[in-house]
Image: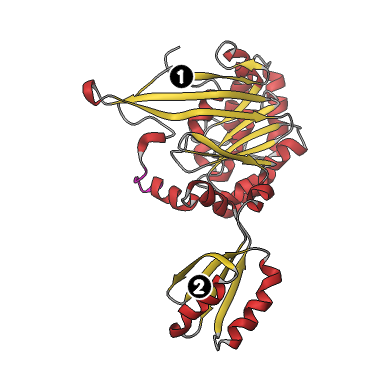
Amino acid sequence: MIHARGLVQTFHTGQGKKKQAVHAVNGVDIDVEEGEVVGFLGPNGAGKTTTLRMLTTLLKPTAGTATVAGYDVVKESEQVRRSIGYVSQVGSTFSGAYAGDEVVDHGMLYGMSRSLAVKRGEALFEQLDLDGLWRRMPKNMSGGQKRRLDIVMGLIHEPTLVFLDEPTTGLDPQARANLWDHIEGLRSRRGATVFLTTHYLDEADALADRIVIIDKGTIVASDTSDNLKANVSGDLVDLEVADPELVALAAEKLGGIADKVTVTDRHVSGRVQRAGKVIPGLMRDLESGGISLDAIEVHRPTLDDVFLSLTGRSLRDAEDAAEAGTDQPDSGDSAPEGAVLEGAKR
């Protein structure tokens, strides 16, 4: 369904001697097979949306090649657009129009008759829990309803490949969980292939058959969630020591079975292989040393641990930094003000 090789997107910042080339995407290879749900994971500024825009023909690659649904994204862009569904971060509905009219107009843009667009639209409204909202304006809908309406817009022409760009951003937990059910149904009920960009770890974990991680414009991993987690060295064991004076001794004990022991106040933690088997022996060792614990916790590896092991930073930390405006712009998902994208002109 998607086969990309060496995708590059470059933009320029500054003028004259201060002009610099910035690689938002730098040599990306991606393969997505029919029927897969692939999660495209990375912090803001990693290159997720830029890659998605190239794959959906909204941005011409500076270099590299890609075929989507069997068509070249540059030479056969119209055929690509007719073959895919695309749900952008910001949505595509006009807030002052009736929801049903928006859907029908969108379907007719794909060459459908009005009657067929109405029939498909009403069926999709029922499938995505939008019954009774055909004559409601998006501005009067909840956030979850508007995102489901965006998905209807992307499915009206029955595409076999659907791109979802940050579909649950800004939704409350209940609305996110509800939308997850509908995203899972895109394949189970409709047989669609889904390419999902997200920075929510739990979302990628729950929905994706395979996860592709991008950082600073480069793919750093591609595998199932379980396999990625298995590559992280051990379970995280965290000891909360009752007596602050015995923290150093507890760290020494844990260091006998763990890697990279860290100490924060009364907490001692480290990565332990097969923690379930060695914890009983550790507890006996601590007890013989007179070390009492207020708590002990064992955490299985998470996708954030995977990201940390691959990039040296936490995905959550990177995301917080980006949202605070402190991330560097050298791999941004959109060009800085005044930047000129190479390949943006067709």
At 66% from the left and 34% from the top, the residue drawn is 194
177 sits to left or right of 217: right
Q: Which residues are magenta?
A: 323-327
Amino acid marked by disc 1 = Thr
Q: Can you give x and y, in whole percent of width and height, for residue 182 in the image?
A: 68, 42
Amino acid marked by disc 2 = Val
Q: Nearer the viewer, residue 277 or 57?
A: 277
On screen, residue 300 above or below 1: below
Q: Can you give x and y, in whole percent of width and height, for residue 193 in the image?
A: 70, 31
Q: Can you give x and y, in whole percent of width and height, for residue 153 in the image?
A: 61, 29
Q: Which residue is mark 1?
A: 62
- Based on the picture, tell me whether residue 324 belongs to the magenta stretch: yes
Q: Which residue is mark 2?
A: 268
Q: Secondary structure at mark 1?
A: loop
Q: Circle 2: is it few (<14), some (14-19), or many (20+) Cα within 10 Å?
A: many
At 61% from the left and 48% from the top, the residue drawn is 203
On screen, residue 147 above or below 83: below
Q: Secondary structure at mark 2?
A: strand
At 68% from the left and 44% from the top, the residue drawn is 224
Report if the CB atoms under discs 2 and 1 are less than 8 Å apart: no
Residue 32 at least partly seen: yes
